[in-house]
Every structure is written in C-alpha cells, then in structure tokens.
Image: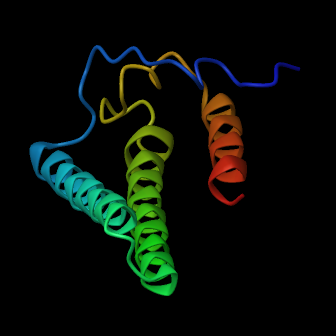
Amino acid sequence: MDLYPYRVLSLEAKEKSMDDGQRQKIKSRVNRIAGQVGGIQRMVEEDRYCVDILTQIAAVRSALDTLGVELLAGHLESCVLGHGTESEHACAKPMTQEELLAEVRVSLSRFLK
C-alpha cells in the first residue's frame, strides 16, 4: 500500500470546486492569519513580553485550526459526498470514494497532530 493515496500531494488544479463566496471567505481568513503572524514577528523585534507573544501564537494556532476545519468540511461536502455530481475538484474526479476516504484519513492524521 502506498504511503500517500492517489494524488494526495498533487498541486494540479484544472478546475475550481470552491464557489467565489467560499474562496473569498478562505482568502480573508488566510490574510487575517498572515497579519497575525506579522504581528508576532513585530512583537519579537520589539522585544515584547514573552507571555504576550505566546498568547498571540495561541490565537494563530486557533485561527489555523478553524481554517483547517472549514477546508475539511468543504472538501467532504464537495469532493467526497458530492463525488460524481460535478461539484468535486478536478483532482478528485478520477478517484473512487474509497480513495477519497483514504485521502481524508491521511489529511486528518496530519491535521490532528
């Protein structure tokens, strides 16, 4: 058995599976997280109190977890449950539901570490 299911690490994207509203929401979250990380960098450069920096790191981790859950839920809805309905991403189309489920398992094991 392969360590990674079919195309789990593929970066090819020939079709869009997220609608524009979902994509904008994700982009906004990513931008907010990037801003938080930039804030942490400034705090370090300004020699801010360690506990304050750790608090900001906890906030970034929480924001990343929320982003991951949102992406996972969207993937399950469009690519796994919606497989065969033309709602799935181009990378998911050639996969079986069993392969998609194996891919979710691998992704979840990484996400939950």
Along the viewing direction, whichever of 32 and 82 lies nearer the viewer = 32
Report x, y in % for residue 60. Answer: 41, 68
| The quarter of the displayed image where residue 17 is located | top left
Query: Compared to 87, does 36 lie above or below?
Result: below
- Residue drawn 69% across the image and 34% down it: 98
Query: Compared to 60, does 12 lie above or below?
Result: above
Query: Compared to 59, does 29 lie above or below?
Result: above
Give the side of residue 41 with respect to residue 76, left or right.
left
Q: Residue furthest right?
A: 1
- Residue drawn 70% across the image and 41% down it: 106
Give the side of residue 3 with respect to residue 102, left or right.
right
Query: Compared to 54, does 67 lie above or below?
Result: above
| The quarter of the displayed image where residue 100 is located | top right
| The quarter of the displayed image where residue 87 is located | top left
Colour mode of the rendering: rainbow
Report x, y in % for residue 101. Answer: 65, 41
- Residue drawn 36% across the image and 33% down it: 88
Q: Quadrant of the N terminus?
A: top right
Q: Quadrant of the C terminus?
A: bottom right
Count of numbered badges drawn on the protein: 0
Report x, y in % for residue 66. Answer: 42, 68
Report x, y in % for residue 70. Answer: 38, 60
Along the viewing direction, whichever of 87 and 48 lies nearer the viewer = 48
Give the side of residue 96 with respect to residue 83, left or right.
right
- Residue drawn 37% across the image and 44% down it: 78
